[in-house]
Amino acid sequence: MARKPLPKNAETDVIVTSRRRCCICFGLNRDTGIKGGQIAHLDKNNSNHAISNLAFLCFDHHDEYDSISSQRKNLTIGEVKKFRDELYTTINKAFTQQVHFGEITTPPSDPYAGSWIRIGSINNSAEITLTPLPDTIDGLVQYYVSGQALWGAHREYGPNMGFLGYVGIKAEGEERIYPSKSWAYGEDNCRIILDFADINEAIVRDKSPTGTYGANVSFDGSYRRER
């Protein structure tokens, strides 16, 4: 009996949602690179085209998932589905951040714009970037605050990775940037405040709910501006 081809709408859904990232590469190594690959039927039933049964895998991991070995523990369907869900969540956060088109220039007088690197943490690195935006209609200074942080870079299976993206407002008369919405109802549960000791040093206080950016991932800490 001829194998039924994967419906085009299902194929498109998986490829677009995964952005051609292999969920096993991501789950094991936090590898977010674009890969050549195939769409796998996770229950190994090629006629089950349910979206919940499909995942984009690189060629190597597709072959590994389909193989059976008596020498080692094979990848399980539950394991791969978990990796896929983690990948989809991460991609959704990354690709729903605001995108700035055209060249963005930082005014020489802007004391905060640019990249800030967390210091004193080798295994849990983090970087935050402040991009100037037009002032609000009330004349408040705005920045687009974006960044990423790692937790557990020393772990055998790689670190957890979290992404940050929100519009921040500089508090009038204070050296502080906070989410444009209220402290209690920040964008995407974001409850991060940046306090600046001077133009090169900042303290980030992350009071976001646990798991907002991924398991154990936090942006707390001292940061130094990168020139």
Image (spheres, grey):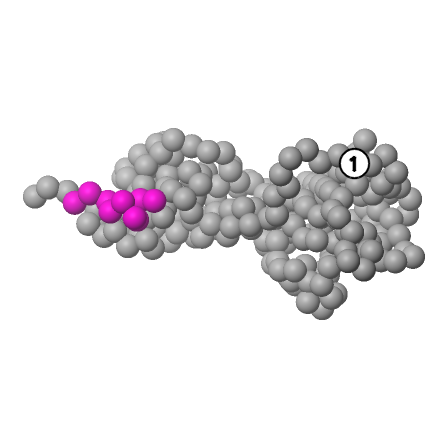
Task: State whether residue 71 appears in this view.
Answer: no
Q: Look at 36% across and 46% down and name the residue there.
A: 14
Q: Amino acid at mark 1?
A: Thr
Q: Is the N terminus in the top left, top right, bottom left or bottom right quadrant?
A: top left
- Give the residue displayed 71% in from the left and 48% down from the top: 144
* Residue 13 picture location, percent across and down: 36, 48
Residue range in magenta is 4-12
**Position of residue 195 measured from the top left corner of the image (x, y, whole percent):** 85, 52
Residue 106 or 146: which is nearer the viewer?
A: 106
Instruction: Answer whether residue 39 is visible to the viewer in this image.
Output: yes
Viewer-side residue, 21 vs 220: 21
Magenta-drawn stretch contains 9: yes
Q: Is residue 143 above or below residue 137?
A: above
Q: Residue at x 75, y 48 (%)?
A: 134
Judge by depth and name the residue closer to the eye, 75 or 117: 117
Q: Is residue 174 left or right of residue 162?
A: right
Quadrant in the picture for residue 112: top right
Outermost residue toward the left in this view: 1
Q: Secondary structure at mark 1?
A: loop
Which residue in the protein does label 1 denote?
106
Percent position (x, y) of residue 5? 20, 43
Within 10 angstroms of label 1, few (less than 14), some, or many (20 or more) residues? some
Q: Is residue 66 left or right of residue 130?
A: left
**Where residue 46 sits: x, y (%)?**
21, 46
Residue shown at 31% from the left, 34% from the top: 63
Quarter of the image containing the C terminus? top right
Relative depth, front residue between 198 and 22: 198
Is 38 colored magenta in this rendering? no
Q: Is residue 201 left or right of residue 20?
A: right
Q: Is residue 209 above or below residue 77?
A: below
